[in-house]
Image: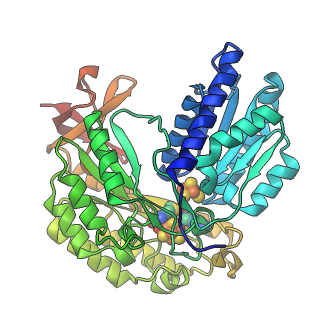
Amino acid sequence: MENRTVVISPEQLAAQAAVCENIKAYWAAQNRTPRAFVDTYGCQQNEADSERIRGMLVSCGYEIVDTEEGADCIVINTCAIREHAETRVFGNVGALVHTKNRHPGQKIFLCGCMAGQPHVVERIKKSYHHVDGVFNPHQLWRFPELLQYVLKTNKRIFAAEDSAGNIAEGIPVVRSNNLKAWVSIMYGCNNFCSYCIVPYVRGRERSRKPEEILEEVRELVAAGYKDITLLGQNVNSYGKDLDCGVDFADLMADIASLPGQFWLRFMTSHPKDASKKLFDTIAKYPKICNQFHLPFQSGNDRVLKAMNRHYDSAQYLSLVEYGRSVMPDLVLTSDVIVGFPGETEEEFEDTIKLIEKVRYDALFTFIFSPRQGTPAAKMDDPTPKEEKNRRFDRLCEVQNRISQEIHSAYIGKTMCVLVDGREEDSLTARTEGGRLVRIAGDDGLIGQFIDVRITDCTTWSLVGETE
Ligand code: SAH
Ligand code: SF4
Ligand code: F3S
């Protein structure tokens, strides 16, 4: 594999745009508006990619619908992070045989991180004949060309060659929300944590140019977006590949200096690269939310080493301490894995101790899932499944108690929230720290920053009333 980022040229992208026009004309000649359904699994990176897939489909004349039934084109954007995610996708893709029988012209594509694994591509090729096309994350920008091939020839296409990755600017995008926007600032990952599939399916770290990112955020703010999240697998590595003297903290400072009222967030940070400068920058700029998602994965140093994480629990705790010293109201969330191969009961207890010390607002908890091709999948794993489940339940219990305690402490406080939608009879809103708040009120408040008094809470959310 060539270890170099490829920049997709404006000419190559213009050629794809021309293909979109051809597809549009193909449907216009049949006098109908085709329908497309994009189904997304996995993380925000995939959500952001799906917004681009929808953008390309709209450029090809498709109307975006929210069901596979009767759709002319279905795109399944998949996640490979754990076995469970893959099993769900295989089940759902299998069921599409019937949907396609009812609508024989339907074209089905599978893309995303599962398509970055050769054994998955082989399985689709062999056993899922109703899938017309597969493309991995590196081929996403070529989707119009792949769609045209399938429409014209009725043949299947597999675009899944391995690559170090590319950067394609200017792909059309249809965003799924008009207040909150994802902005990918970099792609790929170089860290090779021993359990993780991401570096294999998404290629090497590559950063977008600061001016491209600033321009995108400027446009979003002008269009009325209020909550902007910068995305990358390890945003702290931003800029290392560019040699332009701008690191992640500098980029955040530049974005937070843009005019307009908006909140700026980011995810995810790797503790080995989280710098004091970054915490200081977050503390300095009011638009940057005092929120940090800082995955620790394990509280035990042997396990952290086996995970190839390049920090120990003491270094992690000192980062948290520094963050809180410059932002006493910092909202901290994290990811943790239980049942990593060989994790003993004592090692697991170290994870519980770290959680009790840090007291996270919320945790994303996972049971280790072996991923083919990663070093951890080959490690001895004598702990029975039942024992891992027990550890998982205990961890959730501890965290739920802490979340409930932290949320209870909000009661009586007045906080600024961004009202972002409605669920049944209440409005939904987010605090600067990303906590969900339900409030009574009318739809006119949607899109506004307002002060609310917190009156009640659950483990997962807060209840507030307008002042
Ligand atoms: N780049 C981000 C994480 C992306 S994956 C980071 O490094 O923080 C999101 C989370 O999934 C990880 O933080 C980890 O907790 C979990 N995860 C990744 N691979 C896993 C595996 N094989 N089994 C269980 N959980 C896993
Ligand atoms: Fe996976 Fe580690 Fe990269 Fe995160 S930093 S995407 S966990 S390899
Ligand atoms: Fe899944 Fe790929 Fe994201 S594996 S978690 S969709 S980067």
**In this orientation, which residue lies closer to the viewer: 348 or 165?**
165
Judging from the image, the colouring scheme is rainbow
Q: Can I make out residue 308 in this image?
A: yes
Residue under the image location 33 percent in, 43 percent down:
461
**In this orientation, which residue lies closer to the viewer: 247 or 8?**
8
Which quadrant of the figure contains the C terminus?
top left
Left or right of 33? Residue 447 is left
Q: Can I make out residue 289 in this image?
A: no
Left or right of 142? Residue 105 is right
Q: Position of residue 408 (x, y in %)?
A: 25, 49
Left or right of 54? Residue 331 is left
Furthest toward the top, the residue is 31
Quadrant of the picture in which ligand 3 is shown? bottom right
Left or right of 423? Residue 368 is right
**In this orientation, which residue lies closer to the viewer: 200 or 420?**
200
Furthest toward the front, the residue is 11
Residue under the image location 54 percent in, 79 percent down:
307
**In this orientation, which residue lies closer to the viewer: 81 or 277?**
277
Q: How many marks?
A: 0
Q: Position of residue 137 (x, y in %)?
A: 60, 54
Which quadrant of the figure contains the N terminus?
bottom right
Residue under the image location 50 percent in, 45 percent down:
47
Please, is residue 321 above or below residue 404 in the view? below
Q: Position of residue 85 (x, y in %)?
A: 64, 52
Q: Position of residue 92 (x, y in %)?
A: 72, 40
Furthest toward the right, the residue is 126
Please, is residue 224 above or below residue 345 in the view? above
